[in-house]
Image (spheres, rainbow, N blue to C red):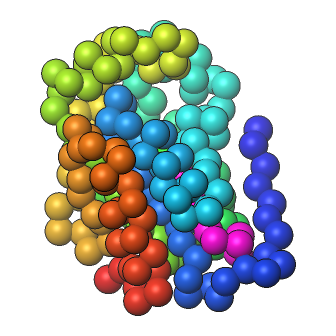
Amino acid sequence: MVTFSMSTAGSPPASERIAVVVMGVAGAGKTTVARGLARTLAAEFIDGDDVHADESRKKMRSGHALSDAERRPWLDRIGAALSIGLRAPSGTIVACSALKRAERDHLRTATGPALQFVYLAAEPAAMRRRVGGRAGHHLPASLVDSQFAALEPPWGECDVIEVSAEANLERMIPRLAARLAGAATRGSC
């Protein structure tokens, strides 16, 4: 299990620390974008895949989607990490699917109003190709369609920034980082 602890020595004020979930379906680039944002913003990066229980990874690897009940403890761990991360020097950025509104609301409850989301909007065919080309990942391409079936796009949620999963990362990440940092100081909603 992953544990989370941070030092706050020399930290910026809490109003400038960020808690961000980069969300979307498998293959959208959550890990890549979250890592890039964390590097740019000097924040901690957590890959939500690393927080899954071994049994959950095994189930997904065998081609079975997790139930809402099986995802709940995982979301609890991510919410705790984000909450702890708000006390970190610059905050925390997590790559996490957060496909359903209830999952995002669960994370909002655990973290509070400082939480922001980046939604990587994607097309099914492109994501099947991306996931099918991965080696060693716990989620097979056969589960991409179940991710789209579960997806409740975050349209109208005031703390969500939507970007294309096909966007140029070299241009997108600096712009996104600036927007997230600005939202952290003035509140996202």
Is residue 137 covered in magenta? no
Name the image quarter holding residue 179: bottom left
Q: Position of residue 143 (x, y in %)?
A: 33, 20
Is 113 or 166 nearer to us in this picture? 166
Residue in the picture at 54% in, 12% down: 136
Q: Is residue 157 above or below residue 32?
A: below
Give the residue displayed 34% in from the left and 45% down from the top. Answer: 169
Quadrant containing the N terminus is top right
Q: Residue at x 30, y 32 (%)?
A: 147
> Vertical placement of 83 versus 133: above or below?
below
Q: Observer-nearest residue: 15 or 55?
A: 15
| Residue 100: % across, % down | 32, 50
- Compared across the picture, whether 136 is left or right of 124 comes to right
Kindly give the residue lying farthest to the front in the view shown.
170
Check the image and report above or below for 41 versus 25: below
- Give the total number of marks visible in the rendering: 0
Q: Which stretch appears magenta?
A: 87-94
Q: Is residue 117 visible?
A: no
Q: Residue at x 45, y 30 (%)?
A: 66
Q: Quadrant of residue 177?
A: bottom left
Q: Is residue 81 visible?
A: yes
Q: In this picture, is 101 found above or below 139?
A: below
Point out the image quarter for the C terminus.
Answer: bottom left
User: x, y percentage for residue 21?
Assistant: 45, 56
Q: Nearer the viewer, residue 78 or 176?
A: 176
